[in-house]
Image: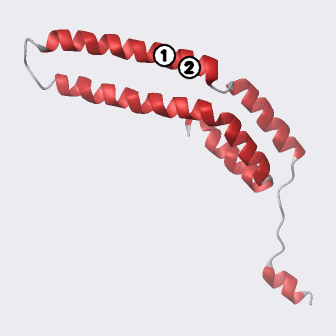
């Protein structure tokens, strides 16, 4: 997961599954934007690499248009992230508050519980 939020969710899930769910919901929009951009960037990289394998005079305008579209997608990604993505600093503060105010769930071992009877 981007921005190391996967371990945050795991750590919270150990302590309090409800807190982990709430944190994941708060981070989900930002994560979705990050993942969509990573996939789109990979697609642009593949197309760019394939253009290098072809020698044609028709590719110059296409390569120019591809570079323009890549810049547009990057700008849109930044706009979306700033408008709808979760604020990373706020997520970190929320995570720290949750970690400080929850305790890990302790389960009694089955063998120990049976031995006590």
Q: Residues within 10 Å of mark 2 (few under 14, many from 20)?
A: some
Q: Residues within 10 Å of mark 1 (few under 14, many from 20)?
A: few
- Seen in the picture, residue 15 relative to 96 is either above or below; the reply is below
Tell me where residue 54 sits by quadrant. top left
- Position of residue 96 measured from the top left corner of the image (x, y, whole percent): 81, 36
- Position of residue 16 measured from the top left corner of the image (x, y, whole percent): 80, 53
* Marks 2/1: CA–CA distance: 6 Å
Q: Secondary structure at mark 2?
A: helix
**Residue linked to disc 2:** 80
Name which residue lies at 84% across and 74% down: 108
- Position of residue 42 measured from the top left corner of the image (x, y, whole percent): 36, 31
Foreground residue among 114 and 38: 38
Residue occupying the far left of the picture: 56
Q: Quadrant of the C terminus?
A: bottom right
Q: Is residue 17 left or right of residue 28?
A: right
Name which residue lies at 28% across and 16% down: 66
- Position of residue 115 measured from the top left corner of the image (x, y, whole percent): 87, 88
- Seen in the picture, residue 84 relative to 64 is either above or below; the reply is below
**Residue linked to disc 1:** 76
Q: Secondary structure at mark 1?
A: helix
Contact check, label 2 and label 1, Cβ < 8 Å: yes
């Amino acid at each position: 997961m981007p921005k190391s939020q996967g371990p945050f969710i795991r750590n919270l899930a150990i302590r309090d599954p409800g807190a982990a769910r709430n944190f994941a919901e708060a981070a989900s929009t930002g994560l979705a934007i990050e993942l969509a951009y990573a996939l789109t960037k990979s697609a642009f990289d593949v197309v760019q690499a394939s253009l290098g394998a072809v020698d044609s005079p028709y590719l110059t305008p296409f390569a120019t248009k591809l570079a323009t579209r890549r810049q547009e997608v990057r700008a849109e990604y930044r706009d979306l992230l700033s408008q709808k993505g979760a604020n990373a600093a706020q997520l970190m503060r929320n995570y720290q508050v949750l970690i400080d105010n929850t305790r890990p769930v302790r389960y009694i071992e089955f063998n120990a519980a049976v031995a006590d009877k």
